[in-house]
Amino acid sequence: MEKKRTSFSSSLGFILAAAGSAVGLGNIWRFPYLAAKDGGGVFLLTYIILALTFGFTLIVTEIAIGRKTKQSCLTAYGRMNKKFSWLGIIASLVPFLILPYYSIIGGWVLKYAVAFITGNGRAAADDAYFGSFITDYFPPIIFDAIFLLATAFIIFLGVNKGIETVSKILMPALLLVVIGIAIFSLTITGEDGTTGMEGFKAFVVPDFKGIGVKDYFIIATDAMGQLFYSISVAMGIMITYGSYFRDDSNLIDSVNKIEIFDTLVAFLAGVMIIPPVVAFMGVDKMKETAGPSLMFAALPKVFEKMGAVGNVVGAVFFVMVLFAALTSCISIMEAVVASLIDRFGWSRKKATAIETGIAMILSIIICLGYNSFYFETKLPNTAPGKSAQLLDVFDYLSNNVFMPIVAIGTCILVGWFVKPKTIIDEVTKNGEKMGRKHLYIAMVKFIAPVMLVILLLVSLGVF
C-alpha cells in the first residue's frame, strides 16, 4: 500500500489529465453524429446548458470526493458514508467493463492509422474493409493487444511519470491537430459543389422544423447521455484523479477549464467531421452513418474523394483519434488499478499486471464475438433493423445501466446524507468562491437525481 498518495505536480497536469480522460472516442464520433441527428444548434445549445448545470454538478462532486478521501472510487464512497460502500463496487465495475472493449476500439483506430500512414487509405475506403477486419480472428486481437499494452505501460510508470507526462505531451498536440483539421474541413468542396461551410451550418444552426415537445425530450436525453461520455463522470475516473489533486490547488478553477476544454474539442470534432461528410455525401448520409460506421466507414470514403491529399489528412486524423483514445483509456485503466491498490494494498506493478491480464482475456472474448462467439440480440438502445453483439452488451451494461445508477447514488449520498455543504467546504477550503453554489445545491438534491432517473428509465426501454 502506498504510504503517501501521489499527487499531480501542478493544476495544469491535473487539468490536462482530466481533459485527456474526457476527450475520447465519444467526442470524436458520437458528439458530431448526435448534433447532426438532433437539429444541429438545438442539440449544441441543450448540451452547453446541461454541461454548465448537470455536468458541473457531477464533476465537482466526484473530484471533491476524491480529494477529500484521498481514495479511488472503490473505497471513496465508503469513506464518505459506510452505508454507500456498495456504490463504490458498482462505480469500479464500470471502468472494469469498459476497458476491454474500449481497447478493442482503440485497436481499430490503430489499424486505420497504420493503413493511412503506409499509404493504404484507398483500401480502407472499401465497403468490406471494416467488416472483414473485425470479423477476422487474429488481426483485431493483435491491434487490441498493442493498444492495451501501451496503456498498461503508461499506468505502470505511475501518476507523474506516466499519466501526467503523457497528458502534457498528447493533449496540446491533440488540440493543435483538431484545430488544423477543423479549419481544413471548412475549405472543402464536394463533387457536386456542396461546400464545407454548408456542412458547418448544418452542425451549428438550430433547426426547429418539426421539433415538438416529445422530440425535444429525446434531444435533451441524447445530450445528457453524451455528457456522461464527454466528462468521464459516474465511472470512477474523476474520483480517482481527484484523489491525486493537490489540497492547495483551486478546484473550481480547474473544473471550469476542464469543461471549456472538453466542450471546445467536442465542438471542433463536429467541425472536423460534419462539413466534409456533408460536402461529399449529404446530410441524409451523415445521419445514416451513426457510431463507429461514421469513423470507420464514411470518413475513409471522404478522404478517398479528396484525392492525393486525402491519404495525408486521413493519417493525421486517425493519429489524432489514436491520441484521444489513448488518453481516455489511460484514465479508465487507472480507475481500476487505483481501486485495487487502495482496497487490497497491492503494488502498482501487481495491480497493473493483473488488470491488464483480465482485460486482455475479456478483450479476446469480445473480439471473438464477431466470429466464433457471434450472436444477435436486441437491446433497448439497439437501432431499428440492427442487432447487438457482445461488444454492444458490455457497452450497454456499463454506459446505460451502471453509470446512471452510480450518478443517482452519488447525488443521493451528497444531497441527502453527507449534505452538499461537505462538498462545498472541500471545494472552498482555500478561500475560493463557488459562483454556482446555490445552483449546485438545487441540482445535486433535486434536479439531477430526477433527470438521471429519467435517463435510466429511457435506457432500460421503459419509455
Image (cartoon, rainbow, N blue to C red):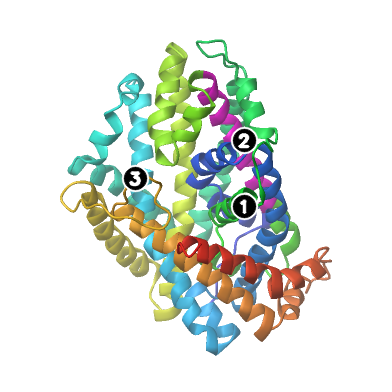
Magenta-highlighted residues: 258-279
Q: Is residue 168 at all visible to an observer of this figure? A: yes
Quarter of the image with the N terminus in it: bottom left
Residues 250 and 47: in front is 47
Identify residue for label 3. 386
Instruction: Tell me the element at label 2.
Output: helix
Provide the residue designation for mark 2: 268
Q: Tell me which amino acid carries mark 2.
A: Leu
Q: How many marks?
A: 3
Residue 81 image point, x, y percent: 58, 87
Circle nearer the viewer, 3 or 2: 3
* Few, some or many residues within 10 Å of mark 1 (<14, 14–19, 20+): few
- Please state which of the two labelled residues, at mark 1 or mark 2, is closer to the viewer: 1
Label 2 crowding class (10 Å Cα cut-off): few <14, some 14-19, many 20+? many
Q: Secondary structure at mark 1?
A: helix
Residue at x-position 50% and y-position 34% = 287
Q: Which mark is residue 214?
A: 1
Residue shown at the point (60%, 28%) measured from the top left: 182
Marks 1/3 in contact by CB < 8 Å: the verdict is no
Rendering coords of residue 451 (x, y %): 63, 65
Q: Amino acid at mark 1?
A: Lys
> Seen in the image, is 96 located left or right of residue 5?
left
